[in-house]
Amino acid sequence: MSQHRQTMQHYLDALIKCGDFSRYFTPDVVVTVQGTGQRAAGREPAEQLIRFFHQQAFDARPELKTLLVDQDKAAIEADLAGTHTGEFAGIQPTGREIWVPYSVAYDLRGDQISELRIYLPLNALIEQLTT
C-alpha cells in the first residue's frame, strides 16, 4: 500500500469514527466547500469546518463509495447520511434524515493532506430539510 493511500485510509477511518482526523492535515491545510465561499485555513479551522457538517449541523457519517489515490492527489465519492440536529443555512434543526452524495478532491504532501475541495450539492441538502 502506498504512503498516500495509507494516509487516506487512516484519515477516512478517523473521520468516520469522529476521531482525531485533523492529525492527517498539514499545519497550513486549506478546506473549501466549492461554490459557497466557505473556506478554512489551518489545521484547527479546517477540523472545525468538517466537524460542523458531521457533528454540529448534522449527526452524519460519510458512506464511502470510492477512493482514488494517484501520486500526490486523492479523491473520494461518498454519501453524507445522517440526521439534521443543528442550525444549517438558517434552518433550525428538523430531525429529518439526510442523504446527499458528495465528493472531495485532496492534495497530499508527504504523509499529510494539504488541501481539501468539497463538492456538495447544497441545494439538494436544503431541499431535504425544507420539503
Image (spheres, rainbow, N blue to C red):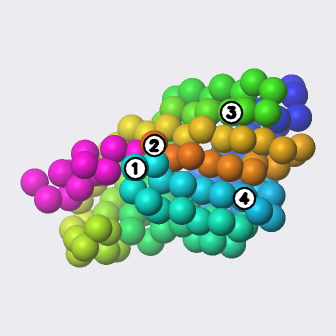
Q: Position of residue 124 (x, y in %)?
A: 25, 45
The count of marks equals 4
Question: Does dot 3 land on a helix, a strand or a loop?
Answer: strand
Residue under the image location 84 percent in, 44 percent down: 109
Disc 3 marks which amino acid? Ala
Residue carrying label 3 = 74
Q: Position of residue 24 (x, y in %)?
A: 78, 54
Q: Confirm or deny contact between disc 2 and disc 1 (CB under 8 A).
A: yes
Residue carrying label 1 = 35
Disc 4 marks which amino acid? Val
Q: Position of residue 11 (x, y in %)?
A: 72, 48
Residue carrying label 2 = 119
Task: Give the quadrant of the N terminus.
Answer: top right
Depth order, front residue of 50/118: 118
Disc 1 marks which amino acid? Gly
Q: Nearer the viewer, mark 1 or mark 4?
A: 1
Inspect this view and state whether residue 47 appears: no
Question: Does dot 1 land on a helix, a strand or a loop?
Answer: loop
Residue found at the far left of this picture: 131
Q: Nearer the viewer, mark 4 or mark 3?
A: 4
Q: Is residue 93 above or below residue 67?
A: below
Q: Confirm or deny contact between disc 4 and disc 3 (CB under 8 A).
A: no
